[in-house]
Image (tube, rainbow, N blue to C red):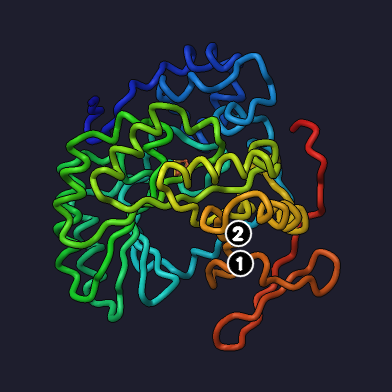
Amino acid sequence: MRRESSFMSGSPALPLEEAARRLGVSWDAMARRAARRLPLRFPEEYLEIVDPEDPEDPLRRIAWPHPEELEADPEAVPDPVGEGGRRLHRLVLQKYADRALLLVTERCHFYCRFCFRADGGREPAPGELAEAIALLAKRPGLRELIFSGGDPLVLPNARLEELFALCGELPELETLRIHTRAPIHDPARVDDGLLTALESAPLPVWTVVHATHPRELRASVLGALAKWRRGGFPLMSQSVLLRGVNDDVGTLAALFRGLYREGVKPYYLHHPDRIAGTARFRLSLTEGLALYRALRESVPGPALPRYVLDLPDGTGKVPVESLVEEEPGLWSVLRPGGRRSVYRDIAPRHPYTGS
Ligand code: SF4
């Protein structure tokens, strides 16, 4: 297990020139500029599943920057999931009374080019997470705290244990949840020390593994998931629907069947958020719905995740199937309390023929 100061990884990160060589791309001025928007980091083991001969390889597509990241993006939404008004603290987001998100780090083992969360911001200062958790003690009805980031599993096991113990002080908290892509990007991170840390938690810990493509479910990943499962900790998954990566029924079905077979319950399939610089990954709701309806015929019920849209107005996630198209491209949904949320979609752009 490797430590880079407070950063814990199982597989060494490659120098960027070497990573570029293995991906069949150049570590050029564009990549350098894009890396200032969202960092680059490549665990050696993950790069082994990328095909350097295929310019449209789906895993290379999520790994390496594209010039459009640096261009104007008229479809982008400045705050794509409406978090602006939901910050209780720099490190706490709360959209629902019974749960909140704790941003325990800004760092990841690998940076997915479609992500909005890893923004290269400032790491929590000493004491800042404890301060955020103490603030949550004053929120009545808080039942679940979700560790997010960045990827919470970049933190050393001892640090996770400290945070779990602090969460145990929250009076009404019933469960902890971890959102992570570490078992996929860096399966060696799932070590005995991590299982010991999970066992130390004073509350049940649910883990949601973020998986994107069935090729990610290689032998090392299956081993990490089996280890987790043998530890007795429940696993769910979330995925983002991404154009040119997993936007066909066969790929999604293979991904969800593969997760289900490994004891991971597919939980959410997210419609892609309108993050600046990510137009190449977007689909319209019409395209996503057609895929999802076909998917229903291709996987067993328990292996079918919920297809959801996180609304830009900050009211949270809704099943895409609950949205109604009021006029071409304008969708709406009734929210609790009788308020109506509207969503202006992008124009359909299928079929995918390259970026
Ligand atoms: S691992 Fe998660 S938080 Fe990090 S870049 Fe990928 S999707 Fe974003």
Q: Label 2 belongs to which residue?
A: 307
Q: Quadrant of the C terminus?
A: top right
Quadrant of res 69: top right
Vertical position of residue 41 compared to residue 37: above or below: above
Relative to 324, 61 lies left or right: left
Vertical position of residue 308 compared to residue 112: above or below: below
Quadrant of res 181: top left
Relative to 277, 317 lies left or right: left
Relative to 123, 130 lies left or right: left
Q: Position of residue 353 (x, y in %)?
A: 80, 33
At 42% from the left and 74% from the top, the residue drawn is 96
At 41% from the left and 18% from the top, the residue drawn is 14
**Separation of marks 2 and 1 at Cα, in angstroms:** 6 Å
- Residue 319, labelled with which disc? 1
Local packing at callout 2 (Cα closer than 10 Å; few below 14, some 14-19, many 20+) is many
Q: Is residue 279 visible?
A: no
At 51% from the left and 57% from the top, the residue drawn is 302
Which of 199 and 26 lies nearest the eye of the viewer? 199
Specify whether tag 1 is near ligand 1 (CB below 8 Å): no
Q: Is residue 267 visible?
A: yes
| Earlier sequence position, callout 2 versus callout 1 | 2
Q: Check if mark 2's residue and mark 1's residue have beta carbons within 8 Å.
A: yes
Q: Quadrant of the N terminus?
A: top left
Residue type, mark 1 in image: Pro
Q: Position of residue 148 (x, y in %)?
A: 37, 52
Q: Position of residue 35 (x, y in %)?
A: 51, 30
Q: Position of residue 133 (x, y in %)?
A: 23, 64
Quadrant of res 172: bottom left
Relative to 301, 168 lies left or right: left
